[in-house]
Amino acid sequence: MSPERRLYAVDWCAVKELIDAARPMMEYEAKRLRRLLGVSNRFLRPFADPLCTDFGAIRFLRNEMAYSDWLAWLVDQLGRADVVLPLFGLETTGSKAEGRIEILRADRESEIAKGRLDLRIMRGKEPLAIVEVKLDKAERADLGSLATYQRWLEKFRGSAAGRLVLLADGGEKAAYKGFRLLTWRDLCLRLRRASSRLIRDKEMTLAAMLLAFVGAVEQNVLRFSYALVKRTVEKINPTVSSDIPDYLAKFIEGESDADSTWNKRAA
């Protein structure tokens, strides 16, 4: 056997040893995934966990604009400042006026000088926050307009500090040109918790739309595999990594700790 062929054989032996060593842990994670999905399904009853529905085959969900439009619609439907602002990690101070809950709306593709705002959160005629939406990692996205958007918001509020959000698939820094990074992963976890509370309050249509959006993001942006989840639930696939189980555990732990009260949205 030539030296090259011997090296090839040794490499495959090493790979097999690594797989065999990792198998018990991956089998444990498969069992953990099935258990956590069962708990999540109970939290979201009468709906199932969004990972149990295939959102990967819908072609328009590969377009960044589709996610921005859908997210803006959800913000409009949720409406309440004390509900919407925490989703984006924004301060809720001043979200109540004279004992009444303030209602927010979201504008899409708002034209300003030298650009368009992906998502502008409004309180009446006052711009409250800007969310820049990217499906990629922050380092791979075009962020050239962020400084312009910051200056625009400062014209209305005096300071844009804490009111600028970059929604992306991740990033190496906490902030980019004044925009605080919010990952799709964290937003989805918050939307999951919001949807379970809406279910408890019989807001079924809106809860379903939130969960559909979450499922679309989880499978198309976060790249959680519906097929893998399906095979694991059916015990066809005996091994998985810890990524999806760890994610579901964060949702369940957060839901268990969450405030059980959820006031009705203002009419």
Image (spheres, grey):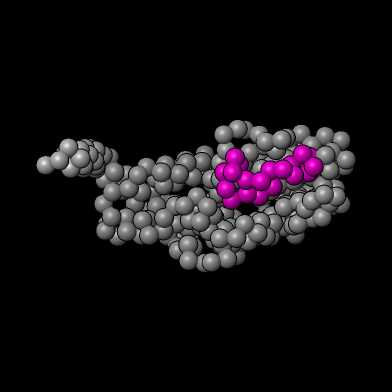
Q: Position of residue 19 (x, y in %)?
A: 24, 42
Q: How many marks?
A: 0
Is residue 115 one of those drawn in magenta? no
Residue at the extreme front of the image, as rendered: 2
Residue at the extreme left of the image, as rendered: 1
Q: Is residue 242 above or below residue 116?
A: above
Q: Position of residue 243 (x, y in %)?
A: 41, 43
Look at 17% across and 37% down and name the residue there: 3
Look at 26% across and 52% down and name the residue there: 238
Q: Position of residue 113 (x, y in %)?
A: 85, 50
For this view, does 64 lie left or right of residue 158? left
Asked if residue 183 shows in the view, the reply is no
Residue 202 occupies which quadrant of the picture?
A: bottom right
Q: Is residue 188 above or below residue 47?
A: above
Look at 72% across and 43% down and name the residue there: 144
Look at 44% across and 52% down and name the residue there: 224
Residue 96 occupies which quadrant of the picture?
A: top right
User: Which segment is the magenta one?
Assistant: 132-150
For this view, does 125 lie left or right of residue 194? right
For this view, does 127 lie left or right of residue 73? right
